[in-house]
Image (cartoon, grey):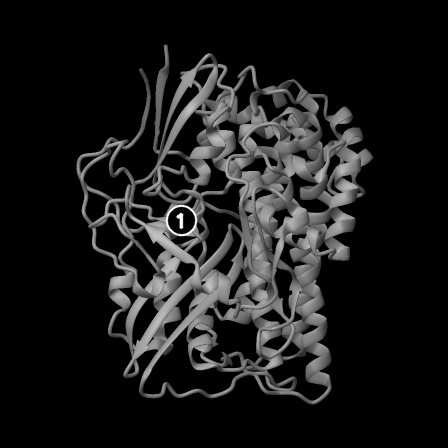
Amino acid sequence: MSTRITLDPITRIEGHLRIDVEVNGGKVSNAWSSAQMWRGIEVILKGRPPEDAWSFAQRFCGVCTTVHAISSIRSVEHALKVEVPLNAQYIRNIMIAQHSVQDHIVHFYHLSALDWVDIVSALKADPKKTAQIAQSISDWPGNSEKEFKAVQDKLKSFVAGGKLGIFASGYWGHPAMKLPPEVNLLAVAHYLKALDYQRKAAQAVAILGGKNPHVQNLVVGGVATAINMENLATLNMERLVYLKTLMEETRDFVQKVYYPDMLAIASAYKDWFKYGAGVTNYLAVPEFPEDTRNTKFALNGGIVTAGNLAAMRPIKDHHDEYLINNVKESVAHAWYEGSSSLHPWEGETKPNYTDFKENEKYSWCKAPRLDGKPVQVGPPAQIFAAYAAGNPKVKKLVDSANSTIGIGIKDYHSTMGRLLARAQRAHLMADISLDNLDKLIANIAAGDKVYANHTEIPKGEYRGVGFHEAPRGTLSHWIVIKNRKIENYQAVVPSTWNASPRDEKGALGPYEASLVGNPVAQADKPLEVLRTVHSFDPCIACAVHAIDPEGKEITKVKVL
């Protein structure tokens, strides 16, 4: 007899997500992913000037702000065939990479770590042994016995005062928790340190973007970040030196704390490389342009079908016709009018709420499909694409991690594989940030001061798409421009791909498919379900917008 579990809302994510699973014999046999908000910014954008779209579009979300601005501005530039000066590309690349560093630090420590780390167990740890473990895997100077003892004392004071705050409702003592007390204490200490370092990455974005969140420095054809090494009011040498200092600090934290912690977690929970594969079709677009026309990139893109890396189809630039022509969004099981699958340039946003009906419509999230197939996006897709393409930095990083843990590249089709790939991406982002800063400084020193190509919106009709490989995966903004106004606008975001409901063929979306086969030890504490859902780093505000007011409970965990 099956047990039905409803988790509503899923916590430690961005946005409102409901997950339903059926459990038979201790394993998930079926699943439904229901986004509980509606997005309407596409409607707001209609009729507005295309050059303003990026400012509105980054309001899709309070977390994924910079990424929407970049995708939006690229959609207009693609439509009008606008080239972007090298200085602007480098500045954008630094903002993109540092945004990713900040995002990945937050996801690992503050959103997903508590699925694997037993906070209460840390109270029993020996701080001296914790320091020995930490120092054996990293030379980071913060791993001292004194530091760990201070964290443990702070944790004890929280417990004694009954003020656990966000730690109060965790599944502590769950049989699926495996880490020894000393490793749990190490993770708690780094959880607290991570709060400081994610802030440093956000500062780096703000230096170039003028503000964070919601950067202010983009224009069609470049950036509005004026460059003058001798002017205090512009991007000058003092700002560049400070920027480098911040990025070196975040790089050291990522590579000497976050990454070793991830390898330790993966080694301790090696069995989780067996669960959570789900959809093994992957999509990643190339990122970090190295020329003015978006044809050369630092990281590879590609399409993987049925997990076959050997047959990966490379995506070399953002003008790939197969990708552009074969994206459609189904609303067969989404709360929108009709049941059609439409290309984003013809996409419609007409809400039609019917309550949760698992065999009919049950989510505000549409179901994007590539050539009719569900696709998983995110760090594993980018790692697969770059690894299959022979990218030397990615191959070295992946092969070393695989040797340490004792796994192969195929094991990345899993819950733990998603977490590991995200840590590897953070490792790469930290280096790419500094690489692009060096390129920016060298280009300025060579005499290039251009940071924007002034662009007027011409009359006529134009169509464009802006692709970006965001922290959660492939993001695309699709724009139709007519008579200098936005005729239509659609965003197909990473969490729309991954959180999608079934399509008209009944094919499950990636969240849903990844849960099937997962173990569930205790139905009233479905920790294993959370582990897999959190491994995607859901961002439902990006996928859908505007909360549904129809009398929903604020918190519900229901076992039938």
Q: Which residue is mark 1?
A: 496
Residue 81 placement, left or right of 272: left
Q: Quadrant of the N terminus?
A: top left
Q: In this orientation, which residue lies closer to the viewer: 258 or 70?
A: 70
Q: In this orientation, which residue lies closer to the viewer: 454 or 203?
A: 454
Query: On the image, which quarter does residue 348 sit in?
Result: bottom left
Mark 1 secondary-structure assignment: helix
Q: Residue at x 67, y 78 (%)?
A: 237
Above or below, 362 against 558 in this view is: below
Query: On the image, which quarter does residue 547 sit in?
Result: top left
Residue 334 visible from this viewpoint: yes
Q: Crowding near pointer 1: few (<14 within 10 Å), some, many (20+)?
A: many
Image spot of residue 489 (x, y percent): 32, 66
Image spot of residue 156 (x, y percent): 57, 23
Residue 212 visible from this viewpoint: no
Q: Residue at x 38, y 60 (%)?
A: 491
Image spot of residue 518 (x, y percent): 51, 24
